[in-house]
Image (cartoon, rainbow, N blue to C red):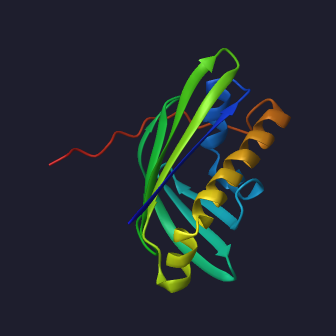
């Protein structure tokens, strides 16, 4: 399993940043390689990605969600990955977005790309494009402010 962490400061209030992040169907507008995301229900998304010429379809489950604080997820089929994004109020109109993602590279090409820092650069670029996206709009495209409780630990 490989772990990657990136963060970025965004000049928009935390509630606006969080609200936009819950609009998964807009991710293709700022995430490189994400072709489509369909929101199946409150906690399930269906992703279509194309990275390095390889298309993947998979389902992800939101495992925890707390408005203005965090969204955590894990894949339920396809390649194994999980992550969490947290939102930190730095001021009335400034937010730090912190992203942590764990994934299992599939095959030699993905493992080599991971070791060469390709995944970290991709995440950093995605966060930079998210910053440009939300700052240029100044407001979110929508919001879902429901809570998803973390699963109980054994």
Give whichever of 66, 109 is nearer the camera: 109
User: Residue placed at 42% from the left, 70% from the top?
Assistant: 104
The residue closer to the viewer here, 22 or 126, is 126
- Give above or below for 56 relative to 34: below
Q: Is residue 46 left or right of residue 151?
A: right
Whether 33 is drawn above or below 14: the answer is below
- Residue, x 72% and y 62% (percent of image)? 32
Question: Residue at image x 67%, y 47%?
Answer: 127
Residue extending furthest toward the front: 116
Toward the right, the furthest residue is 136
Residue 114, percent from left and from top: 53, 69
**Where residue 101 appears, x then y in whole percent?**
48, 55
Residue 31 position, x and y percent, is 70, 57
> What count of labels does the image hold?
0
**The N terminus lies in which quarter of the figure?**
bottom left
Q: Residue furthest top?
A: 92
The answer to whether 92 appears left or right of 56 in the picture is right
Q: Which of 80 and 6 lies nearest the eye of the viewer?
A: 6
Q: Please, is residue 148 above or below residue 77 in the view? A: above
Residue 77: quarter of image: bottom left
- The structure residue drawn at horizontal position 80% and vertical position 29%, both measured from the top left corner, is 138
Image-based side of 154 in relation to 24, left or right: left
> Splitting the image into 4 quarters, where does residue 133 fall?
top right
């Amino acid at each position: 399993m490989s772990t990657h962490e990136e963060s970025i400061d965004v000049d928009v209030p935390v509630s606006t940043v969080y609200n936009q992040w819950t609009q998964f169907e807009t991710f293709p507008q700022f995430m490189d390689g994400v072709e489509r995301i369909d929101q199946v229900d409150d906690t399930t998304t269906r992703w279509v990605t194309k990275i390095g010429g390889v298309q993947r379809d998979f389902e992800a489950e939101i495992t925890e969600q707390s408005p203005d604080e965090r969204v955590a997820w894990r894949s339920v089929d396809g390649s194994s990955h999980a992550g969490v994004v947290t939102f930190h109020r730095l001021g009335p109109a400034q937010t730090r977005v912190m992203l942590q993602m764990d994934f299992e590279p599939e095959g030699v090409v993905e493992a080599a790309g991971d070791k060469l820092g390709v995944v970290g650069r991709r995440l950093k670029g995605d966060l930079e494009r998210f910053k440009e996206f939300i700052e240029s709009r100044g407001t979110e495209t929508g919001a879902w402010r429901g809570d998803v409780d973390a699963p109980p630990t054994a």
